[in-house]
Image (spheres, helix red, strand yellow):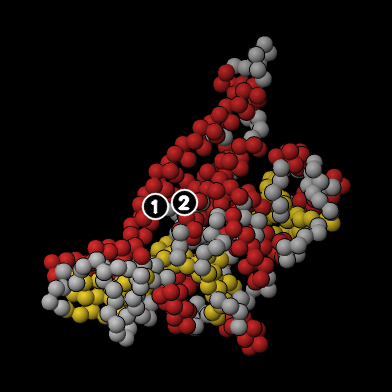
Amino acid sequence: MPREAFEVITTVEGRAVLVGIDRPRTDGWLLEDDLSELGRLADTAGITVAATATQRLERPNPRTFIGAGKAAEVADLAKDLKATVVIFDDELTPSQQANLETLLPETRVIDRTQLILDIFALHAASHEGKLQVELARLEYVLPRLRGMWGHLEAERLGGGRGARFGAGESQLETDRRLTRRRIADVKRELKTVARARETQRAARARSGVFRVALVGYTNAGKSTLLNALTDAGVLVQDQLFATLDATTRRLDLPDGRAVTLTDTVGFINKLPHGLVEAFKSTLDEVREADLLLHVVDAAHPNAEAQVAAVRVVLQEIDAAERPQLLAYNKADLLPVEEQQRLQDAPGAVLISAAAHAGLDALLERIASVAAGADHVFSALVPYDRGDLIGVAHEQAHIISEEHTEHGTRVTLAAHPEVTARFEAFRENAPERSGTIDTDDDAEDDGRP
């Protein structure tokens, strides 16, 4: 494989100059917010920020992102500070990156996208996660490959005067071919892994278990909340993208119902599209969930812009219309008046996952949403179908249960996937408190 496809920032000795442009925008983010977050990303990758450089522009310079004069200033600054890397806050085009590397021949030039990809590569733990990150990185690298090691090809082929193609050109084509081949291989392997994940999701759907997915900005406290609710033991660190792999745990609600709670990869402003595409099978957990529990770092100064950034990604993966609850985490750090303002917001719950505060109220809200999605159903189950009664007790909320001459009459509330298994023994619900007739217009079919 081309070596530049696998260059990952890992050294804590690295020093960086961060570069951003101040331009008109309407997304609620300021340049200082972007650069502050870029600095946290650099720190997560083990890089010390030595300086920042900014320039006010209406739009990026097509050749060097920043103006040519400013680029020369950055080159001098990086040299004076002995910086090992210059990190640009927006994604560079292949030509911009090539031009900047010419201006900074002794300093690595990367953009926000590559930095995030490097962090994902460092933190991916599962086989699927590593494949997803590798795919995103290879697709990012492919248009940026250049014939940087032509001398190696010359040595291998004996290229030189009289050769049909230049050695550098041959090496570039070799790199591109190998990269495309590896992309195809990774995609095939990911399809196999995705089928296994789909089988697991289908099994959970057939079980009728209500599915809750944790979503939110990276470092908002999703893993801390998962641990607080389920004792999952998931790694928690004060770093961006500390955990990448989806983790699913059973969660018991106050009404006795068991649901699944899945922690997913955190989102971020300007999340690389390639990562969203590569993590599609993992993000299917979000798209197919019955409820999205959107965890917000309420104490963050840019909390509302972070909420908006998460909603952009949810829109991109076709999950924006899923039912949502907003869990404002770290609410104990807010002034009382701000807590009251958030408490009055529709679909919001104030919590502190670290302090285990507000979790009972959160569980009650989840239980209420889960109950609202239930299908209430009455059936007379023959005594030789005790297996169905077992299903009712394991996967449904029992409203009433009565043993009669013909079998067990049960009224239950459950996911339609569960109640469908009782369809052959359906009957109109008995006229008494605590039961609901779910089929008022149904005709008597002669069953007891």
Q: Is residue 189 left or right of residue 241?
A: left
The residue labelled by disc 1 is 197
Q: Which of 106 and 422 is in front in this view?
A: 422
Total numbered labels placed on residues in the image:
2
Q: Position of residue 376 (x, y in %)?
A: 35, 73
Is 121 on the left or on the right of 194, as rendered?
right
Q: What element carries label 1?
A: helix
Q: Label 2 is placed on what type of residue?
A: Ser
Q: Toward the viewer: 92 or 248?
A: 248
Q: Residue at x 55, y 48 (%)?
A: 277
Residue 83, x across and y down, in percent: 72, 52
Could you tell me which residue is drawn at 59 percent across and 58 percent down? 315
Kindly identify which numbered label has been placed on residue 242.
Answer: none
Query: Residue at the spot x=37%, y=49% of the render?
Result: 196
- Name the amino acid type tagged 1: Arg
- Work out whether residue 44 can be spotted: no
* 50 displayed left or right of 402: right
Where does the image place residue 367, in percent across and percent down from the top left?
Answer: 42, 77
Picture coordinates of residue 289, whole percent (x, y): 45, 62
Disc 1 and disc 2 in contact, CB within 8 angstroms: yes
The residue under label 2 is 281
Residue 168 in sight = yes
Q: Which residue is drawn at 65% across and 24% down?
A: 169
Q: Is residue 318 placed above or below 210 in the rendered structure? A: above
